[in-house]
Amino acid sequence: MGYKIALIRGDGVGPEVVSSAVQVLSEIGFDADYVEIRAGLSLFKETGKPLEEVELSKIKECDAALKGPIATLPGPGTYTSVNVLLRKYFNLYVNFRPFENLVNEKYPYFNFIIFRENTEELYTGAEWNFGEASVALRVITKKATQKIVSYSFNYALKNDRKRVTVVHKANILKETDGLFRDTFFEESKKYPLQADEIIVDSAAYQLVKNPEQFDVLATPNLYGDILSDLAAGLVGSLGLCGSANIGDKYAIFEPVHGVAWDIAGKGIANPIGAILSSSYLLDWLSEKHNDKRLAKYSKVISLAVKNVLKLKKFTKELGGNLTTEDLTKLIITETKKVEAIF
């Protein structure tokens, strides 16, 4: 079966790392028709819009999307985040971010996942300015919380995970985080897994002190965003981390890192986050379309990346001297070796 994939190359290093991911997908035999989608700061400078309606329609016609980072300008008077827009438009309520320590020798091995609610809370963008004060509306609903919690537990069951931990600040934010926490424990009764809790500031401390204690974390939107970057620091680099934005009918896959303007165009960006995101894309398509061939491709990419990281050959941000192209070629070569054992 041929698949139609929306390709959103993005800003900064986005086009470079997305190209690497596409190269790897092509080399392992993934049959896809890529639909180029323009979005981001460069489009905004041309048209006054970071993403046009016609592009949304084109994305919707595809089976899934592979995306690079897109610049979001800070402060009032700037355009709405394209990431937030896409998540809300396609109701991508799950943000899936796995963190496995393969290179950071300062820490023992750990392998945990953050499931971040992806559509509401402070990221609704409901804010008002009253001159000397600004106010933001924080919205947490039971329905959205049930969906992210259910997804977290179901994933844990399918993937032999033992424990799901809710991250909250319900001791202070008694209504909003209280609802998130209470809903978590209500839903947890449906699953034969350990369910526990941790206050968000304690979670940040414990992640730094003892990350191997965690298995699956379920968080509201803002906490998941912040803790994900902390976790990326624990594994050694944002460039090593991929992610998925998943809804009931659609999904978008992207590296965790930002646009990295300082190294854009220099050919030294780490493509691993984008390449791992492409493996998550294959997994999702495999499950949705019952295509076992794609599940195999996903495992090949994941194992090839792990094997290459064991060689201790890195791009600049990890102290190495490989270019984006060098690392991509190493991973492609390793996929050929891995395929032989499947």
Image (cartoon, rainbow, N blue to C red):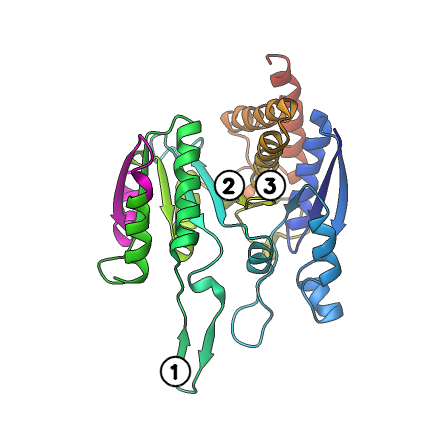
Q: Which of 184 and 4 is in front in this view?
A: 184
- Rendered location of residue 92, percent (x, y): 54, 50
State the mark number for residue 133: 1
Residue 239 versus residue 126: which sits nearer the camera?
126
Q: Earlier in the sequence, mark 2 or mark 3?
A: 2
**First in sequence: mark 2 vs mark 1:** 1
**Residue 31 shown in magenta:** no
Question: At label 3, which amino acid type do we have?
Answer: Ala
Residue 340: x %, y % from top left? 64, 13
Whether residue 200 appears in magenta in the rendering, the answer is yes
Q: Is residue 91 left or right of residue 336?
A: left
* Residue 117 spot, x, y in % from top left: 44, 51
Disc 1 on helix, strand or loop? loop
Asked which quadrant contains residue 24, the reply is top right
Q: Which of marks 1 and 3 is nearer the N terminus?
A: 1
The magenta-colored residue range is 187-210
Residue 135 is left or right of residue 259, and the answer is left
Secondary structure beneath label 2:
loop
Q: What's under tag 1, amino acid-wise? A: Ala
Amino acid at dot 2: Cys
Q: Residue furthest left?
A: 171
Residue 268 x/y as whole percent: 62, 44
Q: Name the residue under label 2.
A: 241
Place residue 170 in its image quadrant. bottom left
Dot 1 alpha-carbon crowd within 10 angstroms: few under 14, some 14 to 19, many 20 or more: few
Q: Distance between the residues labelled 1 and 3?
A: 40 Å
Is the C-beta separation of discs 2 and 3 under 8 Å?
Answer: no
**Residue bearing the label numbered 3:** 274
The answer for how far apart the CA atoms under marks 2 and 1 are is 37 Å
Mark 2 Cα within 10 Å, few/some/many (few <14, many 20+)?
many
Res 233 visible: no
For the N terminus, which image quadrant? Answer: top right
